[in-house]
Amino acid sequence: MTDFFDFQDGPKIKILILFLVLICSMYYFFKNYKTLDFQPKLLLCIAILGSIWLFFQEKEENKDYNNLKNNFALTTGKIEKYIVVNLKGYKGNPGNSIKFKYVCNNETIENSYYESYIVSIPDAKPDLNISYLVIYERSNPENSYILLNYPIKNSDDFEKYENMFRDKIPEDIF
């Protein structure tokens, strides 16, 4: 239960909803097991298993985020692909994604991610010709994010950002 309080606000709400779906589905399933047809039983089993799977997926994503926060390093990276899903009337499209490359320990790493509670991807396309700051986990360099609000336009920018991140991660990075 102490892990629950380490989650970000968005995942906490998602986990609470999944927990309610799980409890209600299990209650209905076991209370009406003998009177239910096969299809509702199958759908309830899928809802129960899906809720459990989504809970563990959310927990793993949050663990990766906390590991990154506690053991981070910085480098520069370039955007390879930037996709914005245009759903009218919906702010913060869940389908926005980004693919980027960066060098860590003399190895080129390619990573991508979708917009989530942890990181938002703006609808406005960034400049693909410049580099951006990349934050990654020292012990697992594949756990990384490109920080679009930290562009590197000249050689002094990276040093300036390193000084900003020296003590801790700023609040506005994601």
Image (cartoon, rainbow, N blue to C red):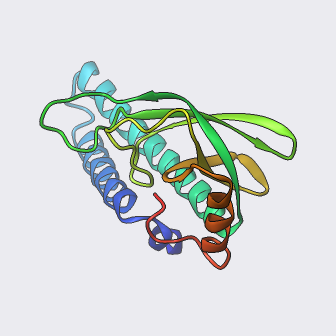
- Closer-to-camera residue (97/156): 156
Q: Residue furthest right?
A: 106
| Left or right of 135 in this view: 42 | left
Query: Where does residue 63 sit, x and y in percent of width and height?
Result: 59, 58
Residue sitting at the far bottom: 167
Number of numbered discs on residues: 0
Q: Horizontally, is 142 left or right of 105 in the view?
A: left
- Which image quadrant for residue 93? top left
As rendered, which of 89 and 25 lies closer to the eye? 89
Q: Estimate the x, y position of residue 155 in percent, counting from the top left.
A: 68, 54
Q: Is residue 88 left or right of residue 77?
A: left
Q: Residue furthest left?
A: 89
Residue 141 x %, y %: 74, 48
- Asked if residue 166 lies left or right of residue 120, the reply is right
Residue drawn at x 60%, y 52% as measured from the top left: 133
At 44% from the left edge and 43% from the top edge, which residue is drawn? 54
Q: In x, y percent, where is residue 148?
A: 48, 48
The residue lying at 57 percent from left, 51 percent from top is 60
Residues 93 and 152: in front is 152
* x 61%, y 37%: residue: 78
Q: Would you place residue 109 above or below residue 8 in this image?
A: above
Q: Is residue 40 positioned above or below 156 on the image?
A: above
